[in-house]
Amino acid sequence: MPEGANPAADYELGLRLLNARAMQRVLGSMGDPYALVLRGADDPYPLYAAIRERGPIYHSTTGSRVTADPGVIAEVLADPRWRMAGPDGSPAAEQPLPFYGYGTPGAEADEHARLRPHWQPLVDPETLAAHRKTVERECLARLDRAAGDDLMAGYAWPVATAATGALLGVPAAALPRYAELCADAEALQDSLLAAQPLALVRRIEDAVAGLDELFGGLSETKESSDRAVRVLLSVAAVPATAHLVGNAVHALLAEPGGWAALCRDPDLAPAAVAETLRYDPPVQAEIRVAAAPVELAGAELPAGSHLVMITAAAGRDETRHPEPDRFRLDRQAEPEPLTFAGGLHHLPAALLARAQAEVALRILAEARPNLRPSGTPVYRRRAPVVRGPVELPVLGLGET
């Protein structure tokens, strides 16, 4: 038995998680579209449309209130009364399907402001401009060694971890361990909403502790706030970068002429990233708890109300975006996607992920114009927040 293991605590938590997943399956089988989202689907967008059809705020049988309405989402994200946890940092009250939210360092808007002196130097325009050169070197190095036919394992994840690690000061010798910890922590954001297997929950906890320990061993990150920012960027920006690249490539290869258009003009990479954030973003939902009574969309919601905002659904709203189900590189004068609008993904993680994904797409288009799909992408289950393929089979990745 691992040192420090607590069998009684593991049994209690494991039973709660198992019961939550069982209830999730039952409620989904009874037709609750949000319960089906929590269970996981290769294509969740029809479920988002079903949620939208149920009105601006849908009270799911899971206990959560759910919205896919862009106006409601924008209003909540701008209102400081809606938080990730209680005003004192305590967890939200459990729903029939538990919400495991807690005061994640850096998650609240006021925490972003407090931590700004620690994260701003990492993502200011001058730093990111220089960092793009680092990302470019990592992309080219990875393509030089590319083998196999999985874009995620062969390119997107290695680039995301190596580039982010370089920005955060991870020594080269520690990069393999850093990549392992980031991969183990990938489901953290999903675990705040959807019950995960006990072994995965413990692995996430160990990974976050390992990242904190890794950064604690660096001379420039002895201060707890510096470590918190680097852990935040590791658990948010690394998967966002990897899945932003994966989702963009998948969409471009699926859209007739999409990949060829980017290869003809690799400077369209920023447009491809922006369109991916609308069409199939790596962050699908934001979660908030009302710290005080709130009136929203004509309803009086008590303090403690749990609201899930399907931000990805706003990108497929035809009142905001013409031809919402088409991936187009020529969109202009349309509303900004609500992805990265708040929470763990706000400001530092969003700026870093977008910059890294733009470089990664441009380099891939320049170096691998013959890239083409070779199979069906594989997605994780119980992943209602972070969306991206676990595997993305392609041909041409290892070409020289």
Image (cartoon, grey):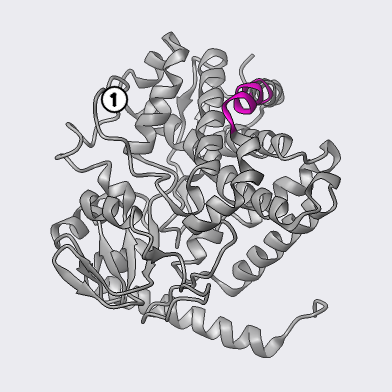
**Magenta stretch, residue numbers:** 124-135
Residue 184 appears in the picture as rendered: yes
**x, y percentage for residue 218?**
84, 47
Most foreground residue, 376 or 362 = 362
Q: Residue furthest top?
A: 264
The image quarter in which residue 315 lies: top left
Please give the name of the residue rendered at 47% of the width and 55% of the height, measured from the top-left corner: 109
Q: Secondary structure at mark 1?
A: loop
Query: Horizontally, is 160 left or right of 141 in the view?
Result: left
Query: Horizontally, is 316 left or right of 131 in the view?
Result: left
Q: Which secondary structure is most common in the magenta stretch?
A: helix
Please give the name of the residue rendered at 49% of the width and 66% of the height, measured from the top-left corner: 192
Please give the name of the residue rendered at 64% of the width and 27% of the height, measured from the top-left corner: 127
**106 up-or-down from 7: above or below:** above
| Residue type (three-letter) at the residue carrying disc 1 | Arg
Most foreground residue, 172 or 117 = 117
**x, y percentage for residue 168?**
71, 40
Residue of label 1: 328
Residue 39 appears in the picture as rendered: no
The image quarter in which residue 257 lies: top left
Query: Horizontally, is 88 left or right of 139 in the view?
Result: left
